[in-house]
Amino acid sequence: MTVRGVLLDLDGTVYHHDNPLPGAAEAIDRLRERGLSLLFFSNNPLYGGEEYVDRLQSLGVDARPGEACSSAVVTQEYVDDNHAGDDVFVIGSASIRDRIARGAANVVAEPRDADVLLASWTDEFHYDDMVDALRALDTGTIYLGTDPDPTFPGPDGHPVPGTGAVLRAITGVTEREPDRVLGKPSEVAIEAALDRLGRDPEEILVVGDRIGTDILLGERAGMRTALVMTGVTDDATLSASDVKPDHVLDSLADVETLLE
């Protein structure tokens, strides 16, 4: 296949927490030698693109300015484009709250004032947050989530609850599904990836470890997909899934075999 751009997931694909996966940095070097456009795209809503570039560089990965995106970035862009001047109540980390506050919307402290409820990951999620969601979500309030990931790898490699778990808790008490979830595999994330890579969908290879986000994004967009078995997906999960990758790799270190 003709590949001119590669969309790379991060945690579980390039690294685990603060440890680069074997052969990942070398594989990225080889992609660069082929002149391919690269975009690193994480569904972790804590950090922006340049923060991910800095983190990758600290791990010995050749990442360059403008080559990283995240659910936090696409969420801020979506809120700025669609809810400028609106009052946003945030259930989530201080980092996503600060990011939204720096943009075109107003972050409010009182849930009853909200035009928009934005929910995201926080390790301080509490009963009081569900009460706030109940107060915020009247019939006219938009309900947004940063990303759908129910878990993500913790420092020891074992899964811990992610934004998807927070969204399910809020939905359980409010009986409202989010109006939009903005990270991978949403249309918003697809558009962000295409804009940054500057390639047609059929020229892009998506490499990631999560079927329901990385691989589904590629399927929806008409991109080629490769699942790596270094993250959250095991053989049983792959067999049971209705979403199937075009390729399955032991790790990112094997990606060049798809380009020969």
Image (tube, rainbow, N blue to C red):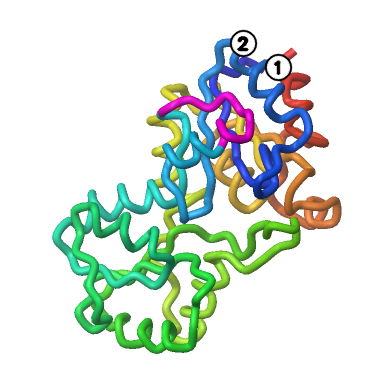
Task: Give the CA separation, mark 1 to mark 2.
Answer: 9 Å
Total marks placed: 2
Q: Is residue 163 above or below residue 16?
A: below
What's the residue at 64%, 58% (across, down)?
152
Label 1: how many Cα within 10 Å (few below 14, some 14–19, many 20+): few
What's the residue at 52%, 80% (across, down)?
169
Label 2: how many Cα within 10 Å (few below 14, some 14–19, many 20+): few
**Quadrant of residue 197 within the rendered picture:** top left
Q: Does residue 185 appear left or right of residue 89 in this picture?
A: right
What's the residue at 57%, 27% (across, down)?
6
Q: Amino acid at mark 1?
A: Leu
Q: Which residue is mark 2?
A: 34
Horizontal and vertical percent for residue 45? 47, 55
Q: Tell which residue pokes out farthest to the front in this image.
A: 58
Q: Is residue 172 above or below residue 48?
A: below
Front residue of this view, candidates 172 and 39: 39
What's the residue at 58%, 65% (across, down)?
162
Secondary element type, mark 2: loop
Task: Indicate which disc residue 114 carries.
Answer: none
Q: Tell which residue pokes out farthest to the left in this image.
A: 85
The magenta stretch is: 56-65
Q: Which residue is mark 1?
A: 259
